[in-house]
Image (cartoon, rainbow, N blue to C red):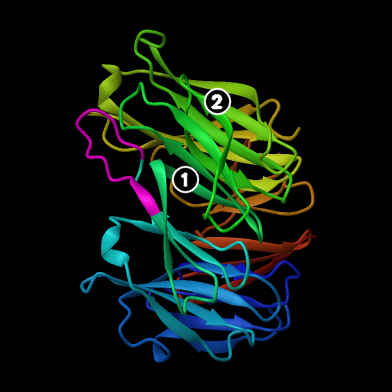
């Protein structure tokens, strides 16, 4: 098993490996039934991200890597049957990403990381949208390159865009309330390069911007957190994070992403690398006041187990063979074995996968 997920109520859950084999549950993990996604899609070379919407509905992305094809799978009977539809424009993207504001709406865009200098520019000015569950698709185009898309609510999406691939490009946050047919700018900046957006609720959201201007930041790379509490209509910069350079500024790459969004708690990962550094570094930060201030937690270079945290305070967490009780500030080894993934459906219970096992743990 590579992943495990539950719906928000903790009733419908799935655990499976990249080849689509695994198990699913309808009763919160008390009993499990065999799952084989490949029986519904024989062309797939692998199954990846899962979105479990409610006790009946889930989406899964599937790929035929050799054939360069992408499929979207949907179940509306809690995993008993699946319907897969092929995305017809997969060759438009190096790495495709999806967002789903509702059960019927799907947006597909280029998700390759933000590059500079010698790195090739993979971003696109176009994306595709389906409003009927993947039966038909329409292309939407913007005047600038799309760096990120985010669902605000079923009828509203936001885009982070940039005018070009240089450090001196103009970057904006755009909002659309008609499935991307028309847009208006809610924030435009010549200093910050917006490259990630995330909404935890239809009102509460975070955008991440990077500053690469060599005349202003010759020694450090800076990331800034922007907050909205009105659904993306207005934004305020609340915090700046900085990373020391290890060489010339143009030899690095950076990206940022929200690991946990449960206002007022947010956890942010900032990934970066330098020429000759031997891989990515990840600096992890936590905010307990809706993104207004952030606490540095740790550097994760060489540790790749994704953590899971328990609601409602998100203090207790598990990753690999470690456990935290202070929200990720400190971790200690608790188990003689390492789980691949974990999920807390509630505050007192955790499910984890390890090899071919599904494990259940309860609070003392």
Residue 213 drawn at (x, y percent):
38, 16
Name the residue beneath numbered marker 1: 148
Instruction: Tell whether position 123 is magenta.
Output: yes
Asked which secondary structure carries label 2, the reply is: strand
Query: In screen coordinates, is 301 left or right of 64?
Result: right
Name the residue nearer the viewer: 320 or 78: 78
Query: In screen coordinates, is 132 left or right of 345?
Result: left
Q: Is residue 256 above or below residue 66?
A: above
Q: Residue at x 50, y 59 (%)?
A: 338
Can residue 327 be seen? no
Query: In screen coordinates, is 347 left or right of 17?
Result: right
Name the residue beneath numbered marker 2: 224
Instruction: Tell whether position 237 is magenta.
Output: no
Q: Quadrant of the C terminus?
A: bottom right
Q: Residue at x 44, y 83 (%)?
A: 84
Q: Is residue 181 above or below residue 135?
A: above
Assess disc 2: are there few (<14), some (14-19) or many (≥20) residues with their C-alpha within 10 Å of its C-alpha: some
Residue 232 drawn at (x, y percent):
66, 40
Q: Residue 47 sits in which quadrant?
A: bottom left
Name the residue nearer the viewer: 91 or 34: 91
Q: Residue at x 38, y 86 (%)?
A: 41
Residue 157 drawn at (x, y percent):
59, 52
Write the start and end of the magenta stretch as one range: 114-126
């Amino acid at each position: 098993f590579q992943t495990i997920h539950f719906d928000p109520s903790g009733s419908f859950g799935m655990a499976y490996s990249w080849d689509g084999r695994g198990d699913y549950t309808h009763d919160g993990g008390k009993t499990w039934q065999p799952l084989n996604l490949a029986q519904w899609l024989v062309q797939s070379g692998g199954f990846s991200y899962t979105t479990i919407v409610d006790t009946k509905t889930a989406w899964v992305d599937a790929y035929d890597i050799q054939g360069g094809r992408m499929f979207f799978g949907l179940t509306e009977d809690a995993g008993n049957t699946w319907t897969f539809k092929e995305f017809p424009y997969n060759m438009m993207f190096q790495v495709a990403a999806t967002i789903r504001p509702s059960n019927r709406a799907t947006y597909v865009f280029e998700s390759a990381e933000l590059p500079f200098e010698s790195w090739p520019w993979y971003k696109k000015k176009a994306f595709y949208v389906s409003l009927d569950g993947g039966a038909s698709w329409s292309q939407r185009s913007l005047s600038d390159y799309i760096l990120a898309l985010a669902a605000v609510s079923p009828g509203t999406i936001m885009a982070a865009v940039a005018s070009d691939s240089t450090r001196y490009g103009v970057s904006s946050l755009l909002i659309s309330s008609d499935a991307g047919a028309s847009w208006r700018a809610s924030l435009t900046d010549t200093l910050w390069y917006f490259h990630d957006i995330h909404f935890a609720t239809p009102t509460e959201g975070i955008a991440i911007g990077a500053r690469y201007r060599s005349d202003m930041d010759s020694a450090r790379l800076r990331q800034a957190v922007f907050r909205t509490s009105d659904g993306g209509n207005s934004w305020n910069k609340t915090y700046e994070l900085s990373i020391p350079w290890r060489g010339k500024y143009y030899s690095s790459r950076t990206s940022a992403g929200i690991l946990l969004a449960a206002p007022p708690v947010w956890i942010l990962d900032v990934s970066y690398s330098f020429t000759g550094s031997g891989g990515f570094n990840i600096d992890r930060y936590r905010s307990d006041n809706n993104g207004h201030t952030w606490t540095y937690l740790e550097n994760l270079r060489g540790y790749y187990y994704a953590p899971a945290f328990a609601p409602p305070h998100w203090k207790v967490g598990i990753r690999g063979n470690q456990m935290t009780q202070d929200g990720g500030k400190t971790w200690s080894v608790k188990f003689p074995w390492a789980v691949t993934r974990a999920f807390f459906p509630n505050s007192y219970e955790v499910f984890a996968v390890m090899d071919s096992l599904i494990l259940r743990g309860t609070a003392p």
